Image (tube, rainbow, N blue to C red):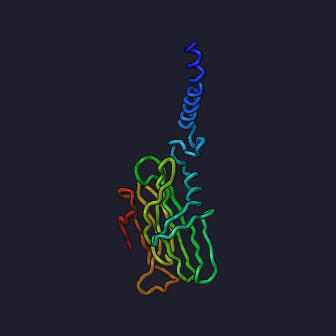
């Protein structure tokens, strides 16, 4: 008689253990599957997922301000006093920290109602369950981005910057910038003009 009572009381625990095991196995076997609490399995994001997430990410700019993009753009306010525009100028995906998973190198361009268009580079590191933004580095005001590429763990940007006699509208100096990650932080490694 005592054994029957124990079995009845133990069954809810067995169900919970069984369901937990099923959720755990699904999370391991199905890449990208999220469990009941919305937690993503350990499978890292694909390149396509990273591009989509980057276009809808909340970015922290060099000045510390934060803006969430929607389809690659954030825009609010009117006039010089409160206008803000932030968009993705370019995006490249590749492994930047030698973990075999792709990261996103993102060039953002912001405008705050004046004539300036301020470019900065940041990286979204692929953590498997989420993307984590590194620090951002300024590229300049009204530079002309020609090419952004990720290869062999490095970011290469070919752009036109302002020479000593260039007006702000018209940069003409060919420049190549090479960036990399060191201890999770974005750093300029080389500059060729």
Q: Number of callouts in the render?
A: 0
Q: Position of residue 83 (x, y in %)?
A: 60, 78
Residue at point 55%, 14% (across, down): 2
Residue at point 59%, 60% (across, down): 56
Most foreground residue, 142 or 157: 142
Q: Quadrant of the N terminus?
A: top right
Residue at point 53%, 62% (across, down): 91
Q: Is residue 46 visible?
A: yes
Q: Quadrant of the C terminus?
A: bottom left
Residue at point 53%, 42% (across, down): 41
Q: Position of residue 79 (x, y in %)?
A: 62, 83
Instruction: Decide: is 50 above or below 174.
Output: above
Residue lying furthest top in this view? 1
178 left or right, relative to 56: left
Most foreground residue, 39 or 74: 39
Instruction: Decide: is 41 above or below 115.
Output: above
């Amino acid at each position: 008689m005592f054994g029957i009572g124990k079995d009845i009381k133990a069954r809810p625990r067995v169900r919970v253990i069984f369901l937990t095991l099923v959720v755990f196995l699904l999370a391991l076997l199905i890449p990208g599957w999220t469990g009941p609490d919305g937690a993503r399995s350990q499978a890292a994001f694909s390149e396509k997922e990273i591009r989509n997430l980057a276009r809808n990410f909340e970015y922290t700019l060099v000045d510390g301000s934060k803006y969430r993009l929607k389809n690659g753009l954030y825009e609010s306010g009117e006039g010089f006093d409160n206008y803000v525009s932030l968009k993705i100028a370019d995006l490249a995906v590749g492994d930047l920290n030698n973990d075999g998973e792709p990261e996103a190198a993102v060039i953002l361009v912001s405008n705050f109602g004046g004539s300036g268009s301020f470019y900065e580079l940041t990286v979204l590191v692929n953590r498997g369950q989420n993307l984590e933004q590194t620090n951002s580095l300024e590229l300049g005001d009204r530079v002309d981005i020609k090419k952004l590429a990720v290869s062999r763990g490095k970011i290469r940007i070919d752009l036109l910057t302002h020479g000593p006699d260039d007006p702000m509208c018209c940069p003409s100096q060919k420049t190549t910038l090479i960036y990399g990650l060191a201890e999770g932080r974005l750093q300029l490694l080389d500059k060729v003009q």
